[in-house]
Amino acid sequence: MGMATNVLRFHLDQRAVRGSILVAVVGLLLIPVIVDSDDFPLSTYPMYATARSNDVAFATAWGRGVNGERLELGLGVIGSSDDPLIVAGELRASIRAGAAEDRCQEIARRASSEPSIIWIEVTTERHDVVAHARGEASLIERTVHASCAVSGVSA
Amino acid sequence: MSLPGTLFLRPPPTAPPERLAAFRIILGAFVVSYLVVRMPVFLELGTREPSRFDPAGAFQWIDRPFRGTANTALLVMTLATGVAFTLGWRFRVTGPVFAVVLLLLTSHRSSWGQLLHFENLMVLHVITIAGFRAADAWSLDVRRRNNRVVAPAPDVRYGFPLQLASVVVVVTYVIAGVAKLRYGGLEWLTGDSLRNHIAYSATRVELLGGRSSPLAASLVSNARILRPIAAVTVLIELAAPLALIGRRFRNVWVASAWFMHLGVLAFMFIGFPSPLLLVAFAPMFDLEHVGERVEAYVRGTFVRLDPS
């Protein structure tokens, strides 16, 4: 690398060299756009770029109490992270990969310190997000992919 | 002058070594701080089931996760070389090594089903300047050979890496703007997509047991103002190349982009730390003046502490 640095230092005063490096870097950054494939750290930056409707499906998980009541789990229990992007993305990937059951057990282990939670459900829920943001009833459809007891035994 | 003229035709982009050094320090301190704050997340990756591994970035070549000690060692090495990068210690070695291990660490982070786009720019910036002479001022390397080397004069080898880093910023914003037109089309600009994205973001975090922005509900209920905001957002992203033309355009664009990120943080609770803390835009500015003020302040403080 030291040699590379010396070569760069030697030639950087030449316009053609600087131009070539700039074109190469811009070209590299544009490759994901040309092939339409998002990756890291070269990206198409597709986040929030789609035309989104107000009817959206979400991957999520809930706890159930002894009377079947729905209990909130929290980001740290569902995904072992405080970042909703990470928790949602990874849960969605697990469901898509057919690993919802494994994920349910993992969440159940993390929820075991909360005695009011008897079992866990990993779900996909469709909501009217505008209604939800306004505090109105929003649930359209609910699919349970996996459920498991907090002790770790399948329910 | 036109953009191609700015980049290729005008005299070489010379800069004093302190300007590139200041960017090295700001960028290095930001990345190290980010890694320290997110350390629990990076450490937890080493305990995950390999079945959930979905390789991204550099890990597409490695194709298996780093578990336990290997993951911890990667994080420790990234932090250690990050500190060396920031301090400018043996930079010709530690700079490139930091770029490689940071790419590995963040690729590993993105290899579990969710790409984190706010890490892209900081990684690209480290890679951009790591191979150049970013430690010829304000560094431990300079202190080590202090009596043997005269302070270098402004040179293209200090200006060009900053120009390159600025181009990287500009291109990433343009790509983000193009993505909205490509994937969202006119509907993104003229329809209710932005309102729905804000509502989606609030709903997602609440369904996961988190708290959404209290401002989201009022904005969603007043959707008419969001249509012009959507158009302005895309305009800001596509207008990024203006930042390379001159100081006035640069200042206006950077301020616009910063307020855009502030709005995203306020209404969606999504923070892009690098632009919000102005690190992303730093290579566009004459940073040596900031550094000189800090240096003068530190020296003044020492003189006051030691009047002799």
Image: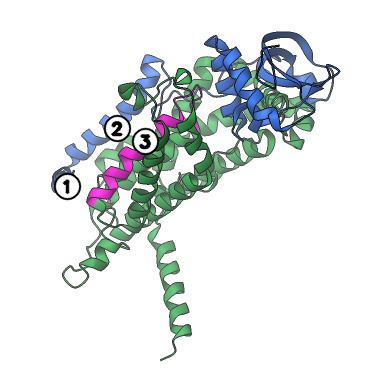
Q: Quadrant of the N terminus of chain A?
A: top left
Which residue is the site of mark 3?
A: B70
Q: Answer whether residue B163 is visible to the viewer in this image.
A: yes
Q: Are marks 1 and 2 on the same chain?
A: yes
Chain that bears disc 2 = A
Q: Residue furthest bottom?
A: B308
Q: Secondary structure at mark 3?
A: helix
Image marks 3 and 1: residues in contact by CB distance under 8 Å:
no
Which residue is the site of mark 2?
A: A25
Foreground: disc 3 or disc 2:
3
Residue B34 or A112: which is nearer the viewer? Answer: A112
Chain identifier of the green chain: B
Q: Which residues are magenta?
A: B92-117
Horizontal side, residue B285 vs residue B5: left or right: right
Foreground: disc 1 or disc 2:
1
Chain that bears disc 3 = B
Picture layout, residue B181 above or below residue B210: above
Crowd around label 1: few <14 · some 14–19 · many ≥20 (10 Å): some
Q: Secondary structure at mark 2?
A: helix
Q: How many marks?
A: 3
Which residue is the site of mark 1?
A: A2
Q: Residue at x 29, y 48 (%)?
A: B95
Q: Secondary structure at mark 1?
A: helix
Chain identifier of the blue chain: A
Residue A7: quarter of image:
top left
